[in-house]
Structures are given as C-alpha cells and as structure tokens.
Image (tube, rainbow, N blue to C red):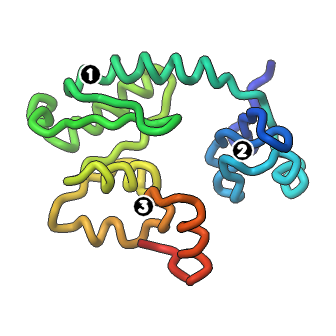
Amino acid sequence: RTVPEDDVPVALSCDGPHGPVVQCVNQVSRDRGITAGDRVVDAQAIHPDLHVEPADVNGDQALMHRLVHWARRWCPWTVQDGQDGLVLDVAGSTHLFGGDAALLRDIVQRFAMQGLTAKVALAPTRGAAQALARYGSTHTICTDKDIALRLAPLPVSALRLDANTNRLLTRLGLKTI
C-alpha cells in the first residue's frame, strides 16, 4: 500500500447498519467537516478525493490496552477514554517531571517517538481536561482561575452530552459552551 500525502483527506471506515461509516479521520478530513459516524458514501459524494481504508478495530483496541499500561510511567491511575483517548490522574506527580508544562511536553514527545500524535490537556477536573484535550489547542494547561475562559469557546459537543441534546442545543443557537 502507498501512504497518502499529508494534504489528502483520509478516513478509516467500519461497518454500519446501512453500509460503511467513518470511524476516524485525519486533520485534513476534519477541516473539511468529515466526522466519525458519517456514512462513507455521503462523505465521498461531497469529497470525491477522500481516501478510505478499512479500520482495524480489534488492533486499535489492543493498542489502546497496551497504551493504558504504558502511560503509567507518568502516574499510577490511567484509563481508556472512549475509543481513542486516555485519562491520566497526574495529581501529585507533575513535580516528578519538572512541572505541568514539562510533563505535557514529555507525554507528547514520548508518544511521537512511538509514531503517535497526542493532544494533551491538564485541568482541575476530568471533564475539563477531556474537553480541552479533544476540542482545545494541542497543549493546554488550565487552572481553577481560567477554567471558564478556556472552556467558553469550545463547542457544546465538548460537554459529552448525548447526540439528541447536542442537536437540540445547536438548533437553539447554542454553539459554544
């Protein structure tokens, strides 16, 4: 197989109830508005240059399981978050790595050494950290004092609400937290 160029939209697909659906996408696809859950035929109708490959769901889960244990290098409490994330409770261990910023740099660098990209965030609550890591900038350190300011521009989908509630909030005009 050939690897697509960095400017090519790529999606991994899995079987859905009405044909293949997008499981995950690269940044180019994300910038075009292609998201997980979209039907592949719909995405390709709008973006004919979309490169689609089958996802290896079992392989991905095996990797995530290994990453959960590997991430314990930074703290003893690590769990998988959804299909593609990790949550680490680093309270009390950041000083061992030179502080918050140094810890996040170390995490990103060590993931990069494994050929993986990590978006990281440190926040006073688990929900805030998850929202910032998934929807914020690449490296975010949030404190009690600036939590409202950091979360405000994020989309309402960062609140981890169900799809119907997200759709309702969007229809009501509420697009950000």
Q: Position of residue 32 (x, y in %)?
A: 71, 57
Judging from the image, what secondary structure is the residue with disc 3 in? helix
- Residue sitting at x 16%, y 62%: 144
Quarter the N terminus occupies: top right
- Name the residue beneath numbered marker 3: 159
Task: Indicate which disc residue 72 carries.
Answer: 1
Q: Position of residue 140 (x, y in %)?
A: 31, 52
- Which of label 2 and label 3 is nearer to you? 3
Residue 69 found in image quarter: top left
- Residue sitting at x 82%, y 45%: 40
Q: Earlier in the sequence, mark 2 or mark 3?
A: 2
Amino acid bearing label 2 = Asp
Number of numbered discs visible in the structure rendering? 3
Residue 88 found in image quarter: top left
Task: Indicate which disc residue 7 carries.
Answer: 2
For label 2, count other residues whose C-alpha is less than 10 Å away and answer few (under 14), some (14-19) or many (20+). Answer: few
Judging from the image, what secondary structure is the residue with disc 1 in? helix
